[in-house]
Image (cartoon, rainbow, N blue to C red):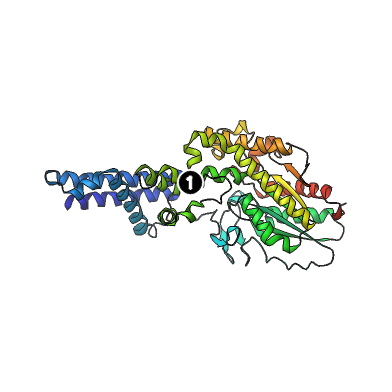
Amino acid sequence: MAWVVLALATYLLAMVAVRQVLASSPLPPLVLAAAAGFLGIVWSSFVAATVATARATRWSPQVALLIGPRGLAVLGLIGMLLFELLLVDAWPAAPDSMRDPPHEPAPYVTFVARPGFRIERPKDVQSHGQATGRISVNSAGFRGPEWPSPQKQMNEIRVAVLGGSAVFYGLTDERTMPAFLSGALARRLDGAAVTALNGGIISANSTQELALLRSRLVDLRPDVIVVYDGFNDIWDPLYYDGRVGQPPDFVGIERPSVARLAHLLYRLGRSIGAVQGILQVTGFLSRDETPYASRSDPRALEALPDDAARQLLGNWRAMADVCRSAGIQCIFALQPTLLYRSGALADDARTRIPPAERDAIERYYAAVEREIGDGAPAAFHGATAVSLAGLFGGSAGAAFWDAVHLYDEANAVVADRVAAIACDAASALRCR
């Protein structure tokens, strides 16, 4: 028993020191989570080894089981969980400048932001760490003020923007891309009041956006719908659910017993990928059941870009059909990313992902641009489509705060470009 107590005490003391380092470390959170998880496994294995050494002359079947790989994995997970439960409140981490609203289940679209959520984010990354960000979520689960009734006011132009976190994010509700788009259109219109609806859902892909368009937005009678997306359709199958078109981590809905364990540890500060990796290696979760098959299977990774591009373009065509039948001008904009055509930034921390995955993203963007072009707006299934992948050119490094999200001033540039496209495409707007 003394050996067990000594090993456990050593483990806890080491993790206290690790916690202090993690709170002030400049390393990415995923790297820190992986390092802490690895340390937990190492120290829990040490506990198991000391137990075995102390009882080497009279092993029992139960102790022998603990020495196996599954036993070590279980001890590691238990050790990580105990550490978080015992110490996370005593040594709180530094304020998170990028804490997002939690998701809530929602019909058709799978999830939205938690309705009524409010948060202030000190030194928000959106402002280069210089200002406090303020996020508010309306009762429908979307960023900003309450959505209006279907009945429009006289001279009101209503614009809805669909997308993922690139649409949702902004320092304040008035500094998101849809909000900037509202101002850019108002400057081009004579006497019209422009109402912008922010339909951004963090992590959502085009399949969810199609569901949102059909189930909610058409009824609000927008004059223009802007679909500003593309990145999540390749990122989600790479890093969440390996099946193209599925909402991120949809495997958690299909296999709730595994998801509950993984998400519990994730919410306590651990990487869900690391947890599922442990479960897979030790045999609790077979390779075919893991949602990360796209990255682990070279054949799946080879086919993924074209599959994801077909999925995105198919959803765009379906949305164009909905817009055309409802008399709405639809604009599709392929969003920019630092992971495409940015060779000079290959070693930038914001773009540091495995070469095979970076290549998959580049091939995906190229496949979409083969359909819609890579510059000027083009006719697309009765709507208008444009690639904004190269919008920032050589200044892209200053526009992004990570691989895909833009600083507010860059979002204003996107909004101005989209406003110009909308004015050219929608004659009913009567722009100046």
**Point 60% across, 46% down: residue:** 232
Relative to 172, say whether 392 is above or below: above
- The residue labelled by disc 1 is 291
Task: Give left or right: position of 422 versus 305.
Answer: right
Q: Position of residue 84 (x, y in %)?
A: 37, 56
Q: Position of residue 124 (x, y in %)?
A: 58, 53
**Point 61% across, 41% down: residue:** 308
Residue toward you, 348 or 403: 403
**Point 80% across, 50% down: residue:** 422
| Residue 287 visible somewhere in the drawing | yes
Q: Which image quadrant is residue 137 in? A: bottom right
Residue toward you, 176 or 215: 215
Q: Position of residue 409 (x, y in %)?
A: 69, 48
**Label 1 CA crowd tier, 10 Å (few <14, some 14–19, many 20+):** many
| Residue 170 visible somewhere in the drawing | no
Q: Position of residue 286 (x, y in %)?
A: 40, 44
Relative to 65, say whether 112 is above or below: below
Q: Which image quadrant is residue 371 in? A: top right
**Point 81% across, 67% down: residue:** 153
Residue toward you, 379 or 142: 379
Task: Give left or right: position of 254 versus 156.
Answer: left
Callout 1: SS = loop
Q: Residue furthest left?
A: 57
Label total for image: 1
Q: Amino acid at mark 1?
A: Pro
